[in-house]
């Protein structure tokens, strides 16, 4: 399925959540913090980011999600993106 967000929004695939602490203790989902960075999968009407960029966004951004193929994507406004990470 192909999806393109409307307006200045992007679809982001969040990073994987660590299931163990640094000491090797398994963490439950209620204790785990959601990662605040991910990979851009689709871009609406914005030139600020491109597909494939790794972005950092606000901790409470992206309450709307969308299941596309086998990926759970987060819908984020471009204004909520704090930075683009370059390698």
Image (tube, grey):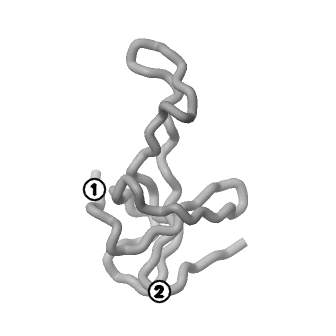
Q: Quadrant of residue 38?
A: bottom left
Q: How many marks?
A: 2
Residue 64 on image: x %, y %: 56, 65
- Dot 1 falls on a residue whose secondary structure is loop
**Residue found farthest to the front:** 30
- Dot 2 falls on a residue whose secondary structure is loop
Which residue is depicted at the point 33% across and 66% down?
81
Pointer 1 or 2: first along the chain: 2
Residue 76 on image: x %, y %: 45, 68
Mark linked to residue 76 = none
Q: Residues within 10 Å of mark 2 (few under 14, many from 20)?
A: few
Residue 9 appears left or right of 58: right
Mark linked to residue 86 = 1
Quadrant where the N terminus is found in the figure: bottom right
Q: CA distance from mark 1 to mark 2?
A: 25 Å
Give whichever of 40, 79 is nearer the camera. 79
Which residue is depicted at the point 64% across and 55% down?
71
Q: Residues within 10 Å of mark 1 (few under 14, many from 20)?
A: few
Residue 14 appears left or right of 79: right
Residue 79 on image: x %, y %: 32, 74
Q: Which numbered mark, 1 or 2, is in the foreground of this view?
A: 2
Residue 63 on image: x %, y %: 52, 61
Which residue is depicted at the point 39% across and 52% down?
37
Q: Which residue is mark 2?
A: 7
Which residue is depicted at the point 56% across and 27% down?
28
- For the residues bearing labels 1 and 2, Cβ distance under 8 angstroms: no
Q: Is residue 44 above or below residue 77?
A: below
């Amino acid at each position: 399925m192909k999806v393109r967000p409307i307006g200045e929004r992007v679809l982001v695939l969040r990073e994987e959540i660590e299931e163990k602490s640094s000491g090797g203790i398994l963490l439950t989902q209620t204790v785990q913090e959601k990662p605040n960075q991910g990979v851009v999968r689709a871009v609406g009407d914005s030139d600020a980011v491109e597909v494939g960029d790794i972005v950092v966004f606000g901790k409470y951004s992206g309450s709307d999600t969308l299941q596309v193929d086998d990926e759970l994507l987060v819908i984020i406004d471009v204004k909520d993106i704090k930075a683009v990470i370059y390698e």
